Image (cartoon, rainbow, N blue to C red):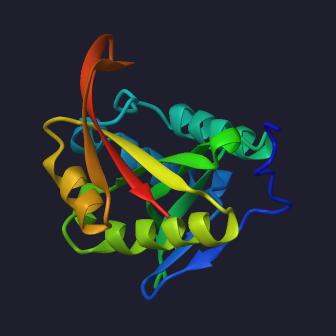
Amino acid sequence: MSNHFLLSSFPQLETERLFLRETTLQDAEAIFAIFSDPSVTQFHDLDTFTSIEEAIALIGRRAKRFERGEGIRWGIARKQDNVLIGSCGFTWNPQEHAAEVGYELTSTFWRQGIMTEAVRTILQYGFEKMNLRFVVAQVMLNNIASKKLLEKLGFHSQGVLKQYGFFKGQYHDLEQFVLNK
């Protein structure tokens, strides 16, 4: 049952301003630029990147997760130059027809509606093409921008999970948000 969401090929999606596409090794420099910015990794379960090898490893992990049918992560690229400026995607629980959404965007493009546009598109894909029943998101309590994004997309807070996330060497309280089909 674990590969219920095994897709035969990586779905390319398009919005008004963006291409949502598979990340390749050609994107390593762009991925490094995103994750070497401490303002981006502040709320992420990754340490700030210090070498291009970390970006290459991340691309590999995401590709393997997709191949195994455990999740999908679209690279977010602007149509005018097709350069990655972030990513968004799902890890899923096929038994429950549920997924957890995650995302990040290079700080230069914050507050321009880009993540709203990208995540709204993948949510639609998840509900319509993957038959998801609900999507969850877990957010660090002081990540106000992420909470506002989720609320704008129709997610509802389910409360705080105490000491739920462990990354960067410590436990974190996470607020859980849910969007039902």
Residue found 68% across the figure and 62% down from its top: 130
Residue found 19% across the figure and 68% down from its top: 111
Q: Tell whether 39 sits left or right of 166.
A: left
Q: Tell whether 90 sits left or right of 174.
A: right
Spot occupied by residue 125 in the image (x, y as percentages of width and height): 59, 70
Q: Tell whether 17 sits left or right of 13.
A: left
In the picture as drawn, the residue positioned furthest to the bottom comes out as: 16
Residue found 14% across the figure and 48% down from its top: 144
Q: Quadrant of the N terminus?
A: top right
When the figure is inspected, residue 71 is found, relative to residue 145, above or below; the finding is above
Spot occupied by residue 75 in the image (x, y as percentages of width and height): 54, 60
Which of 117/28 is in front? 117
Spot occupied by residue 104 in the image (x, y as percentages of width and height): 37, 51
Image-quadrant location for residue 161: top left
Which of 6/181 is in front? 181
Number of marks present in the image shown:
0
Residue found 56% across the figure and 33% down from its top: 53
Which of 103/137 is in front? 137
Spot occupied by residue 24 in the image (x, y as percentages of width and height): 67, 55
Q: Tell whether 7 sits left or right of 119.
A: right
In the picture as drawn, the residue positioned furthest to the top comes out as: 169
